[in-house]
Image (cartoon, rainbow, N blue to C red):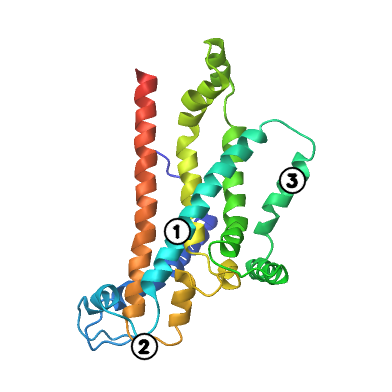
C-alpha cells in the first residue's frame, strides 16, 4: 500500500479544480433553481414558492418578446448542417492527409488558423464580404459558413489524431484477402473510426448550436437561439428566461448523453466481434 504523502502541488491543483467546478456549475445550478420560481417569483433569490409555471409559459403560451420556437429550430438545423458537413469533410481530409502532398503543411495551418482569430472578427469579416458582394446575410448561408470556420478545425484535429494512430496493417490484411479499396474502407476502416466520427459530429453540433460571436454579424434578420437569449436579457423580467436556459442546457446534455451511449454500444459490438 502506497503511504507516500501528498505534495503541496496536489492541494493546489485540488483547490484549482474545486474553483473550476464552482465557476462552471455554480451559475448553471443557480439558473436551474430559479427556473422553478413560483408564479409571483422574480429573477433573483429568495425563492417565492416552487412551480412549473415558467416552463408552461415558455412551452405553451405566446411570449410578448422573443421567438423561442423559431430561434430553436434555426439553431437545431444550423447545428445539424454543421455537424454533417464537419463529419464528412473531416473524414475526407483525414484520409487525404494520411499521405504527404504538395502544400499539405500550409493547407493544414491555414485550416486551423481560424481557431486563433477572434470570433467576432470572423463574423464581421464574413458579414462585410456578403454586403460587398450584394448578398443578404442569412443564418443558412453566411451563418453556416461562419460556424464551419469554428467546427471544422476541431473535427480535422480529431481525425488527424485518429489516423495518426491508425494501424495500416488492418487495411493490408483486408487487401491480402481480396477486398477492394471501398470494401476495405467500409468494412475495416469505418467501423474502427466510427466512435471518433460520432465524437466529431458531437463537437460540430454542440459548437454550432451554442455559438454566439460568429453568428452575431452573419445571421441576417433571424436570430439563432444564443442571439435570442442574449436579446432577451435586456427586456425579459420574468424567470421564463431561466426556464429557457434550463431547457436548452438539458437538451445539450441529452445530445451528449446519446452520443456517449452510441459510442459505448459501438465499442461493445467491436469487442464482441474481436472476441468471436
The residue wearing badge 1 is 77
Relative image position of residue 267 (x, y in whole percent)? 39, 33
Q: Is residue 222 left or right of residue 124?
A: left
Across and down, in percent, residue 72 comes to 40, 67
Above or below — where is 235 with respect to 147?
Answer: below
Crowd rating for badge 2 (residues with CA inside 10 Å; few <14, some 14–19, many 20+): few
Identify the image quadrant of residue 136.
Answer: bottom right
First-in-chain label (1 vs 2): 1
Which mark, residue 107? 3
Q: Quadrant of the C terminus?
A: top left
Residue at image x 70%, y 68%?
A: 125
Q: Secondary structure at mark 2?
A: loop
- Residue located at (56% from left, 36% from top): 162
Using the image, tell me which numbered label, if any, was put on residue 237: 2
Please state if 262 lies on the left or on the right of 130 as rendered: left
Task: Report x, y in % for residue 75.
Answer: 45, 64
Mark 1 against mark 2, which lies toward the viewer?
Answer: 1
Residue 271 appears in the figure: yes
Is residue 21 in sight in this rendering?
no
- Disc with the residue nearer the chain's start (3 vs 1): 1
- Residue 256 lies, with reference to residue 263, above or below; the image says below
- Local crowd at mark 1 within 10 Å, few (<14), some, or many (≥20)? some
> Along the polypeptide, which appears first: circle 2 or circle 3?
3
Kind of element beneath mark 3: helix
Taking the image as shown, residue 272 lies to the left or right of residue 133, namely: left
The quadrant of the image that shows the N terminus is top left
Q: Which residue is painted at 33% across and 85% down in the image? A: 238
Q: Estimate the x, y position of residue 86 in percent, counting from the top left.
A: 55, 48
Circle 3: is it few (<14), some (14-19), or many (20+) Cα within 10 Å? Answer: few
Amino acid at each position: 500500500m502506497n503511504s507516500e504523502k501528498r505534495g503541496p502541488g496536489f492541494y493546489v491543483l485540488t483547490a484549482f479544480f474545486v474553483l473550476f467546478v464552482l465557476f462552471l456549475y455554480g451559475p448553471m445550478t443557480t439558473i436551474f433553481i430559479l427556473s422553478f420560481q413560483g408564479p409571483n417569483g422574480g429573477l433573483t433569490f429568495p425563492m417565492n414558492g416552487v412551480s412549473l409555471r415558467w416552463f408552461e409559459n415558455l412551452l405553451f403560451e405566446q411570449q410578448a418578446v422573443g421567438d423561442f420556437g423559431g430561434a430553436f429550430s434555426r439553431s437545431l438545423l444550423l447545428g445539424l448542417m454543421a455537424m454533417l458537413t464537419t463529419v464528412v469533410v473531416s473524414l475526407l481530409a483525414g484520409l487525404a492527409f494520411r499521405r504527404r502532398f504538395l502544400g499539405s503543411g500550409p493547407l493544414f495551418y491555414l485550416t486551423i488558423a481560424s481557431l486563433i482569430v477572434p470570433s467576432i472578427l470572423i463574423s464581421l469579416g464574413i458579414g462585410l464580404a456578403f454586403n460587398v458582394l450584394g448578398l443578404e446575410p442569412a443564418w443558412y448561408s453566411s451563418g453556416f459558413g461562419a460556424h464551419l470556420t469554428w467546427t471544422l478545425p476541431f473535427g480535422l484535429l480529431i481525425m488527424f489524431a485518429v489516423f495518426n494512430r491508425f494501424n495500416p496493417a488492418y487495411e493490408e490484411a483486408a487487401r491480402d484477402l481480396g477486398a477492394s479499396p471501398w470494401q476495405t474502407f467500409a468494412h475495416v476502416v469505418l467501423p474502427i473510426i466510427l466512435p471518433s466520427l460520432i465524437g466529431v459530429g458531437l463537437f460540430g453540433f454542440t459548437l454550432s448550436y451554442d455559438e454566439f460571436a460568429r453568428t452575431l454579424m452573419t445571421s441576417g434578420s433571424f436570430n439563432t437561439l444564443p442571439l435570442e437569449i442574449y436579446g432577451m436579457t435586456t427586456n425579459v423580467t420574468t424567470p421564463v428566461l431561466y426556464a429557457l436556459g434550463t431547457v436548452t442546457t438539458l437538451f445539450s446534455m441529452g445530445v451528449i448523453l446519446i452520443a456517449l451511449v452510441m459510442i459505448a454500444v459501438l465499442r461493445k459490438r467491436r469487442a464482441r466481434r474481436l472476441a468471436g
